[in-house]
Amino acid sequence: MYNLTHSQKVLLRWFVQQVNQGNLSEEFIISRLLHGSSISGYSGEEPLPEMKKTAIQALQAEGLLQYEDLGNDLRCTLTGKAYEAVDNNFDAPDTSSLVNLKNRIPTDSIKACLSWSYSRAPS
């Protein structure tokens, strides 16, 4: 799972959708203005979503984009992981429940079972 808020997911979906529709390049510059933001090269007609620097930082922390701080501008590049996250509705495989079976079954129990099964095998 991704550690993102709803608004951060909405922002990433918007970026990916605009790239897929040809309205935005995978690399773009967000300019922070007094009353909002603008994106260089954006050719779509949808209004721009709210783009806070902290949201961009959260997306970078999850490996979904890379950004470079240029003062009042942020140069952003979407990663392949961004498209995967949106395509899978942010449902990353949860590996936290995978357990090493070696730690679940004591070795002595395995040896005892194998020993018992060999001793009971037909001759």
Image (cartoon, rainbow, N blue to C red):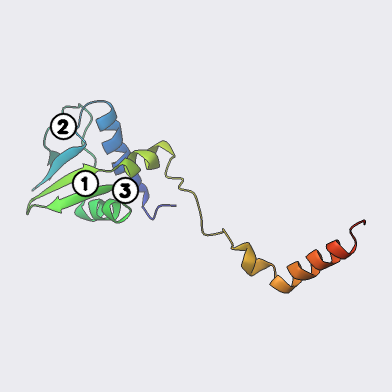
Instruction: Determine whether the residue tagged by mark 1 lies in a helix, strand or loop.
Output: loop
Instruction: Determine whether the residue tagged by mark 3 lies in a helix, strand or loop.
Output: helix
Callouts 2 and 1 close, C-beta under 8 Å: no
Please give left or right for residue 75 compared with residue 17 in the image.
left
* Front-lying residue, 82 or 10: 82
State the residue at coordinates (45%, 48%).
92
Neighbours of disc 3 within 10 Å: few (<14), some (14-19), many (20+): many
Which residue type does callout 3 highlight? Gln
Neighbours of disc 2 within 10 Å: few (<14), some (14-19), many (20+): some
Please identify the quarter of the rendering in which residue 24 is found: top left
**What whole-number distance in Å separates the C-alpha atoms at marks 3 and 2?**
19 Å
Which residue type does callout 1 highlight? Met
- Residue topped by disc 1: 51
State the residue at coordinates (21%, 36%).
26
- Residue extending farthest to the front is 123
Please give left or right for residue 118 compared with residue 21 in the image.
right
**What whole-number distance in Å separates the C-alpha atoms at marks 2 and 1?**
14 Å
